[in-house]
Amino acid sequence: MTPPLQEIWVYLATSPLLGLALTLLAYQAALHIHQRSGNHPLANPVLLAVAFLILLLQLTGTPYQTYFDGAQFVHFLLGPATVALAIPLHAQFRKVKAMLLPLLAALLAGSLTAIVSAMAIGKWMGASPASILSLAPKSVTTPIAMGIAEGIGGIPSLTAGLVIVTGIFGAVVYRYLFTLMRVRDPAAQGFAIGLAAHGIGTARAMQVDQQTGAFAALAMSLNGLLTALLIPLLLPLIRAFL
């Protein structure tokens, strides 16, 4: 950065709301690009916003903690936003009740597959035990995943990054996968994306269809709860695997 720009940045960096403002501006710019692209999956607004912020922090030499001190209000809103997903889900209550047993079976199978497959791939690629443990909750929404990772000896910051990558990847490719597998039911699509790609996938599902978004919200919530219960129960087996 040139000296005048560096001085301006140093001045702005003292504002506690700078991180919040940058986050909102980055997402707004990314959303504009997403809309101009015709809502193309590869132009995912979360992916673009993250890239913009990483580039900005790198160019300005700003530590992540400095940015997060201002942006933590967005992090705080993750909780209320997750709870608010119960509103569209309520409208689908009758269908959820009718599909209860298949949904529970899919939940258990999906949760176990996400845990076991991620750890097996990490083991196969020679990852350290701490890194493998960090992979276990990668399909769960960030606050729960970080808590699980910390409790079992993983690296919470690494888990947070893996969760974001998983969510973005799921939001980008899921429509192509469903087309390839000929899965057309909105409830099945939503439950699968919420189970595999947590909040980011759910946000994408909400843009597609209300029913898809409602079932994605249900899967995201239930998977967070089930994973938090399963991993501690499986921990002796996991440690033997490592």
Image (spheres, rainbow, N blue to C red):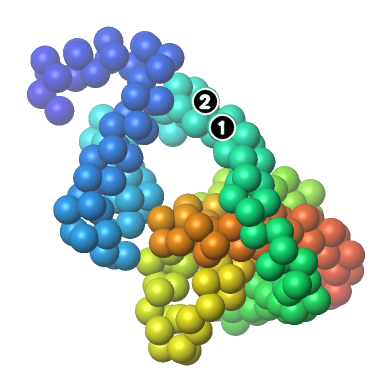
| Disc ID at residue 77 | 1
Q: Is residue 228 above or below residue 12?
A: below
Q: Position of residue 204 (x, y in %)?
A: 44, 58
Q: Position of residue 82 (x, y in %)?
A: 62, 43
| Disc ID at residue 73 | 2
Residue at screen point 75% across, 72% down: 98
| Disc ID at residue 107 | none
Q: Is residue 5 above or below residue 39?
A: above
Asked whether 50 or 159 is in front, the reply is 50
**Crowd rating for badge 2 (residues with CA inside 10 Å; few <14, some 14–19, many 20+):** few
Position of the C terminus by quadrant: bottom right
**Marks 2 and 1, how far apart in space?**
6 Å
Q: Secondary structure at mark 1?
A: loop
Q: In this orientation, does residue 5 appear?
A: yes
Asked whether 33 or 182 is in front, the reply is 182
Q: Secondary structure at mark 2?
A: helix
Q: Position of residue 66 (x, y in %)?
A: 44, 24
Judge from the rendering whether residue 161 lies leftward or rightward of residue 137; answer left or right: left
**Crowd rating for badge 1 (residues with CA inside 10 Å; few <14, some 14–19, many 20+):** few
Q: Position of residue 23 (x, y in %)?
A: 36, 33
Position of the N terminus by quadrant: top left
Residue at far bottom of view: 181
- Residue 108 occupies which quadrant of the picture? bottom right
Of tags 2 and 1, the one toward the viewer is 1
> Is there CB contact under 8 Å for labels 2 and 1?
yes
Residue at screen point 77% across, 55% down: 225
Residue at screen point 80% across, 76% down: 101
Q: In this orientation, does residue 235 appear?
A: no
Q: As shown in the figure, which amino acid type bears the numbered disc 2?
A: Phe
